[in-house]
Image (cartoon, rainbow, N blue to C red):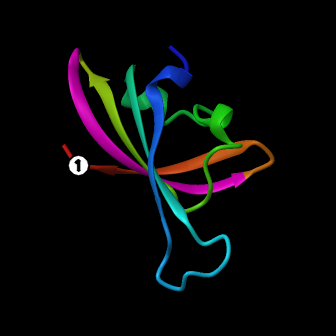
């Protein structure tokens, strides 16, 4: 499958400790029937490049062999419409 906007939601935004202009980070959630490998494929979240920024947190509910799996990601970079993520296994 491919990224689906219906599964993406911004839950909250918070300031960083230094509270400088533009320093806010957001917490997003994403629910998908796609598996981990597909979600981690380069370009998967590019449709949200206008909505996410470096340092944002992305909590996901994905499919792992027919069973739900939770993974957290950090938005590492957003440049020229390309979103780069790093993952952290939590389940």
The stretch of residues the image draws in magenta is 66-78
Instruction: Identify the residue position indicated by label 1 in the image.
Output: 90
Residue 88 at x, y percent in the picture: 34, 52
Rendered-image quadrant of the C terminus = top left
For image coordinates 31% across by 42% down, the residue present is 71
Residue 24 at x, y percent in the picture: 56, 67
In the depicted view, which residue is nearer to us: 19 or 42?
19
Decide if residue 68 is on the left or right side of residue 49.
Answer: left
Residue 40 seen in render:
yes
Helix, strand or loop: magenta stretch: strand
Q: Residues within 10 Å of mark 1 (few under 14, many from 20)?
A: few
Residue 3 seen in render:
no
How many marks overall?
1
Decide if residue 85 is on the left or right side of residue 11.
Answer: right
Decide if residue 51 is on the left or right side of residue 3.
Answer: right
Residue 90 at x, y percent in the picture: 23, 49
In the depicted view, which residue is nearer to us: 59 or 76?
59
**For residue 46: magenta?**
no
For image coordinates 35% across by 48% down, the residue present is 72
Q: Is residue 82 above or below residue 88?
A: above
Residue 41 at x, y percent in the picture: 54, 33
Helix, strand or loop at label 1? It is loop
């Amino acid at each position: 499958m491919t990224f689906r906007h219906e599964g993406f939601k911004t839950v909250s935004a918070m300031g960083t400790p230094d509270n400088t202009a533009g320093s806010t980070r957001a917490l997003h959630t994403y629910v998908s029937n796609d598996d981990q490998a597909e979600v981690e494929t380069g370009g998967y979240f590019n449709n949200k490049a206008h909505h996410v920024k470096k340092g944002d947190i992305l909590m996901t509910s994905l499919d792992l062999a027919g069973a739900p799996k939770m993974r957290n990601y950090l938005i590492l970079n957003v440049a020229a419409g390309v979103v780069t993520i790093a993952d952290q296994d939590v389940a």
